[in-house]
């Protein structure tokens, strides 16, 4: 039972994309989850009713026990921006205006009353600004007593980027860039142009970039954006349609780059690869200039990042290496989902005025393992009720068994402990495999993830062994930094290294080829026993068996679906793919033992291939 002295703050983000809920108790993050994980609708933007129920249940409370509710932005200011934009571009944008207004007038504009009814809560509501929520999510869970804060995204109310300082229990934003000038929307425009889904496919564009050449970078700088030395910029809106239209780019943009946008699922051309490389190069340039300016203005040694652009782990890696900051911390749920967490923490510290303690070494994010957990009893009941063949493993022997399976070239679904909060699988809901295998990258993409063959996979490495494999001098527990591999490269001269474009995939580049991207980089996760003892033990055993302290780690889902949440989700994904084994807690399931394999794998998956 909660104490009368306990303060529970429910943070919410909703109605744009990636709705989420977070519960903070006396300043401690108790639970957080995206709505998509429960509804199985990727990037679900609806009110996060399932996530709210989970958060309340995790704390053993009801809505009546809440001290207050914090929503991640100010709806009236956002509505002002939308109206002003339509008026500015009128008579253009009429179709978009008619599509947007009913939802605003029915739901979004009167947010407090809507939330009150949904939650059946009669207490206080607070509405930090969108970038205040991002800034709070970046700084308050970080290990730093004082740090510069930089937020970058598509758009909140008016701001698209901001910077300031977090100091103790307060965060202050000093300057901002305003809509329609947006680094996030510029990147999304190229996501759209490359045929990927906006607010979903940006990471695909980032992964595609190393296959191309930056031959359009100067065109972007000359025609689309005016970049200043401090990282501020202005976009030439004559090339964009997102301010008032239903698409991101217009015909003038298409003429500039030689044709219409790529149609989804069409062949990826050299132009697509070159556009991806070009916008990635420009984005990194802006991120670096921003970071250097923020360091100059704040004088802080540490930097905290949030907002959707902070999920650009290639740019983050360059900021780490080339900006003057000594330390960097990135919110794992950097996008809008993390706004729920930021709103709750902003309220606890900034509005309620509570003190904040930090030891400068450990963050308060708990490894981002903040979602649901299913105990052995629950999993056993699921397996026995469904009559699913399984083996119960002694916990002390589990790591060795799983490591042996991976070393034997089997692909394993790992469902262990609490679900991750944010877009990255970190060993709680992961698919893991042997990073040494030259065929594993293609196998995972085409036969398990059902996704584009060019997509790279991330390595998970024992924290203490990271420097042996990667040019990385800091911890990277949240898989948000890209680093080059160490000098483990193989001689490619006789292996067709002259190949261009997608053909670069055919070249083995290191002794861990399945996680070495075509530019010799990798999106690294360092794994410690403090945050994930089970995953750490598996990698440790894999190292004992093979001498390699690195495994592949990709999210436990297939294309078009969210990361799995429950044992049911995990089993269904396992059965619909060519995964070999599934670990559910302490239970091991082998594919060859499962009944009805053909029934699952013959299901129509056309909806997955969106």
Image (cartoon, grey):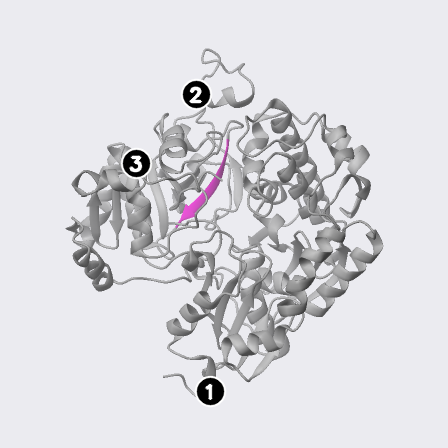
Do the residues bearing badges 1 and 3 touch, measured as CB atoms within 8 Å? no
Using the numbered discs, state the Cα–Cα distance from disc 1 to disc 3 in whole angstroms.
51 Å
Do the residues bearing badges 1 and 2 touch, measured as CB atoms within 8 Å? no
Q: Is label 1 or label 3 in front?
A: 3
Residue at (51% x, 29% y) in the render: 520
**Magenta stretch, main secondary structure class:** strand
Residue 499 in view: yes
For label 3, the residue is 578
Residue 5 bears which disc, if any?
1
Q: Which residues are magenta?
A: 521-527
User: Could you say where residue 299 lies in the image, as x and y percent from the top left?
Assistant: 71, 56
Q: Is residue 524 magenta?
A: yes
Is 469 situated above or below 386? Answer: above
Sequence-wise, which precedes: disc 1 or disc 3? Answer: 1
Furthest residue toward top: 494
Residue 490 bears which disc, if any?
2
Is 435 situated above or below 328? Answer: above
Using the numbered discs, state the Cα–Cα distance from disc 2 to disc 3 in whole angstroms.
30 Å
């Amino acid at each position: 039972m909660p104490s009368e002295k306990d303060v529970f703050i429910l943070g919410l983000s909703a109605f744009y994309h990636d709705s989420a809920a977070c519960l903070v108790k006396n300043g401690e993050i108790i639970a957080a989850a995206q709505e998509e994980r429960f509804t199985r609708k990727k990037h679900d933007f609806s009110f996060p009713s399932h996530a709210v129920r989970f958060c309340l249940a995790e704390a053993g409370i009801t809505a009546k026990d809440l001290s207050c509710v914090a929503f991640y932005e100010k709806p009236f200011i956002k509505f002002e921006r939308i109206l002003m934009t339509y008026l500015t571009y009128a008579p253009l944008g009429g179709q978009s205006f008619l599509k947007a207004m009913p939802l605003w007038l029915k739901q979004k504009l009167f947010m407090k009353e809507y939330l009150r009814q949904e939650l059946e809560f009669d207490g206080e509501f607070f509405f930090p600004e969108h970038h205040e929520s991002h800034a709070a999510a970046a700084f308050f869970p970080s290990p730093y007593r004082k740090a510069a804060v930089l937020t970058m995204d598509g758009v909140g109310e008016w701001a698209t980027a901001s910077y300031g300082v977090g100091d103790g229990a307060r965060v202050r934003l000093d300057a901002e860039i305003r809509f329609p000038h947006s680094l996030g929307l510029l990147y999304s425009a190229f996501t759209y142009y490359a045929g990927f889904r906006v607010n979903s496919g940006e990471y695909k564009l980032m992964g595609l970039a190393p296959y191309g050449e930056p031959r359009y970078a100067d065109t972007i700088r000359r025609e689309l954006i005016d970049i200043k030395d401090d990282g501020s910029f202005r976009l030439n809106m004559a090339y964009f349609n997102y301010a008032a239209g239903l698409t991101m780019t217009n015909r003038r943009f298409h003429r500039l780059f030689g044709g219409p946008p790529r149609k989804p699922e069409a062949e990826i051309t050299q132009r697509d690869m070159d556009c991806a490389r070009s916008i990635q190069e420009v984005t990194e340039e802006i991120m670096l200039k921003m970071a250097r300016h923020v360091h100059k203005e704040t004088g802080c040694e540490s930097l905290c990042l949030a907002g959707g652009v902070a999920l650009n782990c290639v740019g983050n890696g360059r900021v780490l290496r080339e900006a003057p900051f000594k330390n960097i911390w990135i919110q794992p749920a950097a996008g809008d989902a993390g706004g729920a967490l930021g709103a709750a923490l902003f309220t606890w510290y900034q509005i309620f005025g509570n003190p904040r303690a930090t030891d400068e070494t450990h963050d308060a994010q708990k490894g981002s393992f903040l979602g649901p957990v299913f105990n052995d009893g629950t999993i056993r009941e699921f397996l026995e009720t469904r009559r699913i063949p399984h083996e119960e493993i002694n916990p002390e022997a589990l790591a060795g068994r799983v490591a042996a399976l991976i070393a034997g070239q089997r692909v394993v679904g790992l469902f262990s402990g609490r679900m991750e909060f944010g877009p990255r699988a970190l060993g709680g809901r992961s698919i893991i495999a042997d990073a040494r295998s030259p065929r594993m990258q293609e196998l995972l993409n085409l036969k398990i993830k059902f996704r584009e063959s060019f997509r790279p996979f991330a390595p998970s490495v024992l924290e203490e062994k990271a420097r042996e494999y990667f040019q990385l001098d800091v911890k990277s527990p949240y898989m948000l930094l890209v680093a080059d591999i160490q000098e483990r490269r193989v001689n490619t001269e006789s292996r067709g290294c002259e190949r261009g474009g997608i053909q670069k995939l055919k070249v083995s580049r290191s002794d861990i080829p399945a996680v070495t991207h075509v530019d010799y980089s990798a999106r690294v996760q360092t794994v410690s026993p403090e945050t994930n003892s089970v995953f750490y033990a598996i990698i440790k055993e894999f190292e004992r068996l093979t001498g390699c302290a690195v495994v592949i780690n990709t999210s436990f889902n297939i294309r078009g679906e969210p990361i799995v949440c429950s044992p049911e989700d995990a089993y269904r994904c396992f059965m619909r793919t060519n995964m070999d084994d599934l670990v559910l807690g302490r239970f091991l399931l082998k594919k060859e033992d499962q009944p009805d394999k053909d029934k699952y794998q013959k299901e129509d998956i056309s909806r997955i291939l969106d």
